Amino acid sequence: MADSQLFCVAEERSGHCAVVDGNFLYVWGGYVEEQIFWGWHNDVHVFDTKTQTWFQPEIKGGVPPQPRAAHTCAVLGNKGYIFGGRVLQTRMNDLHYLNLDTWTWSGRIPINGESPKHRSWHTLTPIADDKLFLFGGLSADNIPLSDGWIHNVMTNCWKQCSSMMKSRPELWHTACLGKENEIMVFGGSKDDLLSLDTGHCNDLLIFQTQPYSLLRLKIPHMQGLRNIGVPTWEGTVL
């Protein structure tokens, strides 16, 4: 690695995405004040937790996503996926990946069939070796969203999860995967933060992606789960 790439600490920024995989923290994009392109970036920075150093990898090829903020990212295998976000006054629904071995971009991934709405401030969570779960965000029409989608990276198809909790839109929230493949979504806002903010949420939403083990089914609070409309999917609010 060139000396110029070492100790290259990521600039102060907001609206970026960050994801941990193994010993590395990957940071991509975001908004940096008083920089080119109105401050929107598409650079990649990596923090090595073993050596406690930052470096900026040399991108070897491919077409990178447009500079943006309020997007989301996730790692599956050796690929770091980027979805959506805001580019100037536009919100996006494009999906890209960066090969973390070769440092090459995929370009915009062609989707077979229907795609989720353009959005920002959403989450993207790995739920299997070949699947990603997209939830919530703010639409291009500034409408808070409560929809959920599963993307299969092998077929490049999105599938919408029907009968989600449409009365509980979430944006600017966090999400993570539990030990039994349930997705836990916490906090955020239910408003268009650009024009209205009536307060943040402290709800914990739980979405089940596959049947629970027999041991887990014995836990009393699971009796309160209700089906949200697709096979093996259930949800609850705590």
Image: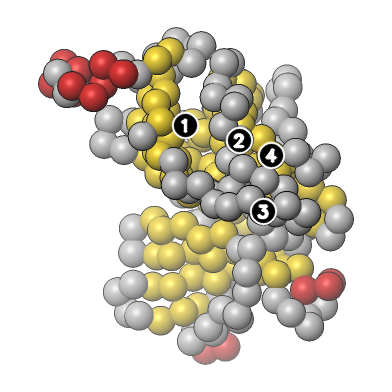
Taking the view exactly as shown, the residue that stands out farthest to the front is 198
Between 94 and 90, which is closer to the camera in this rendering? 90
The answer for how far apart the CA atoms under marks 3 and 2 are is 13 Å
Instruction: Indicate which disc residue 197 carries.
Output: 3
Up/down of 200 relative to 206, above or below? below
Q: Which residue is mark 4?
A: 144
Q: Position of residue 198 (x, y in %)?
A: 63, 50
Crowd band around label 4 with a 10 angstrom C-alpha radius: few (<14), some (14–19), many (20+): many
Q: Earlier in the sequence, mark 4 or mark 3?
A: 4
Marks 1,4: beta carbons within 8 A: no
Q: Earlier in the sequence, mark 1 or mark 3?
A: 1
Three-letter code for the amino acid on which mark 2 is drawn = Pro
Along the horizontal axis of the image, is 184 left or right of 215? right
Up/down of 215 relative to 27, above or below? above
Crowd band around label 2 with a 10 angstrom C-alpha radius: few (<14), some (14–19), many (20+): many
Q: Earlier in the sequence, mark 1 or mark 2?
A: 1
